[in-house]
């Protein structure tokens, strides 16, 4: 499967997952609002997801996929299957033990994750209780991550890319079904997370069987290959999960800023995750196995070409997304969330955080493009060093900015740290000869920025013109739809007028994707 086709497949499913994810957040906003219960749930949900991002999706995939792809290339399906089964056994039993310890230690662990919750009576206890329900989700979603790595290496991207849709649909169904029977809506949502983990796991068990790669439960053994994989997981944990770690630090500090600050950051991040997931995760997921295969085949020039085209595609889609979110953050948040327990003051707070998060959106995506350049060469140490430095910068900026800007300062700190991370990774790859910006990318990047600026001007003017309609709840959705349509058309015209892309190139990419 070509890179374009793979990105389109993953991106298409991710669009659906982000749309259903926004629907889930809208339900949460309606039933939980942005106060104590919402804060407690978001921390309970983020806790297992932090470890998933560090040890499953991020570092584990970065270490597992190149080794699995190598086994597949050198020993065929049987050798690769055995390696995957051994990794699954070691990962699974390790997680069972880890989850058991965390379930026991949860009340104390919560004091470290959200120390400010202790200032509100009952909030710390509620967060610990919800976390005990959600934390086993880590086991199932980590198994999902391993099976996704297997499927992606086989060139089968759709089944794995569709699992977040199951998360969103299942958790929404359980929320609505259990609300009449649970102590709080937060309890219903926590059980929804747990059930969704089981559903996603069972779906991929079926999918790997369909791909003729069924993974058996075997006795865990630390074979040389598994030991090598684990050695690469440890340094890659922080490097691959820097974005989540920055959010984790934000959560700790936000819990002490104000009641509701955790929720404000979460809602803003969920909106920001829509273009990040559609573009960044799709590109990163498709690029790693492709680079691994190209480098193993000695195709260094092809690998450089793949990186440049991935970066061009990332900029083409995320720079305008960032400009749009920064320009019309308030109407977007109002349309999505302002109903039920979510009031106008919450809209103002979340919109301000979204502007700050969106400023770093292209950087978050470029990190997804650059890190495979290290991981495909089996170098997980360099990104971790860069990530550690950027996390230190993030903490310092959080402390400096939380006073004058409160929760918005924390979102801005994350964005700045992401840009620094991007710049350092690009410089290191370039210095080693692993990344050279080609003539086409040098010419296209400024034009993409210009086209995005023109689109932002159209959105700003439209926002002023449609302000009376955007203030009316009954007309908001229609007005925002008009605004987004105008922005999309403006950007489409601008990218072709400025030469940021060409219609013939887009048609060629689509033809290559169909042939693949």
Image: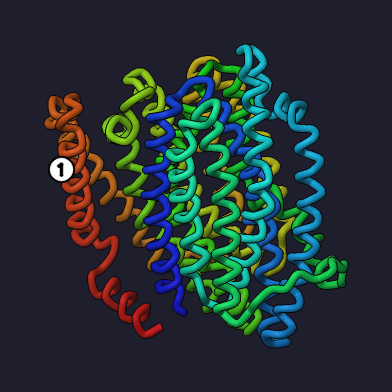
Q: Is residue 58 visible?
A: no
Q: Is residue 409 above or below residue 72?
A: above
Residue 387, position as x, y percentages in the image: 66, 45
- Residue 349's image quarter? top left
Number of numbered discs on residues:
1
- Residue 332's image quarter? top left
Q: Residue at x 78, y 65 (%)?
A: 89
Question: Circle 1 is placed at which residue position?
Answer: 482
Using residue 8 as the reference point, say whether residue 486 is left or right of it: left
Using residue 8 as the reference point, say whether residue 227 is left or right of it: right
Residue 347, position as x, y percentages in the image: 35, 25
Residue 369, position as x, y percentages in the image: 52, 60
Which colour assignment does the render follow? rainbow
Circle 1 — which element? helix
* Along the line of sight, the residue nearer the viewer: 74 or 423: 74
Determine crowd level at label 1: few under 14, some 14-19, many 20+ residues with C-alpha closer than 10 A.
some
Using residue 7 as the reference point, say whether residue 244 is left or right of it: right
Q: Residue at x 17, y 25 (%)?
A: 472
* Along the line of sight, the residue nearer the viewer: 457 or 252: 252
Using residue 350 as the reference point, say whether residue 125 is left or right of it: right
From the image, which quarter does the C terminus lie in?
bottom left
Q: Is residue 9 visible?
A: yes
Q: Is residue 422 above or below residue 512?
A: above
Q: Residue at x 35, y 55 (%)?
A: 317
Q: Residue at x 34, y 81 (%)?
A: 514
Residue 226, position as x, y percentages in the image: 81, 68
Q: Is residue 470 above or below residue 224?
A: above
* Along the line of sight, the residue nearer the viewer: 171 or 389: 171
């Amino acid at each position: 499967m070509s890179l374009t086709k793979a990105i389109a497949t993953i991106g298409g499913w991710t669009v659906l997952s982000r749309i259903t994810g926004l629907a889930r957040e809208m339900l949460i906003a309606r039933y939980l609002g942005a106060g104590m219960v919402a804060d407690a749930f978001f921390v309970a949900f983020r806790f297992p997801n932090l470890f998933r991002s560090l040890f499953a999706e991020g570092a584990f995939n970065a270490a597992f996929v190149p080794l699995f792809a190598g086994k597949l290339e050198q020993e065929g399906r049987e050798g690769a299957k055995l390696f995957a089964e051994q990794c699954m056994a070691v990962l699974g039993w390790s997680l069972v033990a880890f989850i058991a310890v965390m379930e026991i230690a949860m009340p104390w662990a919560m004091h470290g994750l959200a120390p400010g919750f202790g200032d509100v009576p009952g909030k710390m206890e509620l967060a610990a209780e919800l976390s005990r329900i959600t934390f086993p989700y880590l086991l199932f979603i980590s198994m999902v991550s391993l099976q996704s790595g297997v499927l992606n290496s086989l060139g089968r991207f759709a089944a794995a890319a569709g699992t977040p849709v199951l998360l969103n649909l299942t958790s929404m169904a359980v929320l609505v079904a259990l609300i009449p029977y649970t102590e709080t809506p937060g309890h219903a949502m926590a059980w929804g997370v747990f059930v969704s983990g089981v559903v996603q796991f069972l779906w991929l068990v079926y999918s790997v069987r369909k791909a003729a790669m069924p993974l058996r439960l075997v006795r865990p053994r630390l074979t040389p290959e598994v030991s090598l994989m684990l050695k690469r997981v440890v340094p890659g944990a922080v490097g691959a999960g820097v974005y989540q770690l920055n959010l984790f630090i934000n959560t700790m500090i936000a819990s002490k800023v104000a009641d509701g600050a955790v929720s404000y950051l979460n809602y803003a991040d969920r909106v920001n995750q829509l273009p990040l997931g559609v573009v960044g995760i799709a590109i990163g997921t498709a690029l790693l196995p492709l680079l691994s295969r190209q480098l193993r085949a000695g195709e260094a020039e092809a690998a450089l070409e793949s990186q440049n085209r991935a970066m061009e595609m990332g900029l083409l889609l995320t720079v305008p997304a960032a400009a749009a979110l920064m320009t019309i953050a308030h109407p977007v948040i109002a349309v999505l969330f302002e109903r039920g327990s979510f009031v106008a003051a919450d809209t103002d707070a979340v919109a301000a955080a979204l502007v700050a998060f969106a400023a770093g959106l292209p950087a978050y995506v470029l990190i997804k493009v650059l890190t495979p350049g290290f991981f495909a060469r089996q170098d997980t140490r360099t990104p971790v060093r860069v990530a550690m430095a950027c996390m230190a910068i993030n903490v310092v900026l959080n402390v400096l900015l939380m006073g004058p800007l409160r929760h918005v300062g924390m979102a801005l700190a994350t964005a700045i740290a992401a840009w620094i991370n991007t710049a350092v990774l690009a410089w290191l790859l370039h210095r080693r000869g692993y990344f050279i910006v080609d003539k086409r990318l040098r010419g296209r990047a400024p034009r993409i920025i210009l086209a995005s600026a023109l689109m932002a001007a159209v959105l700003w003017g439209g926002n002023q013109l449609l302000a009376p309609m955007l203030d009316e709840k009954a007309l908001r959705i229609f007005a925002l739809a008009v605004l987004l349509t105008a922005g999309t058309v403006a950007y489409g015209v601008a990218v072709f007028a400025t030469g940021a892309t060409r219609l013939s190139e887009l048609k060629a990419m689509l033809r290559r994707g169909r042939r693949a």
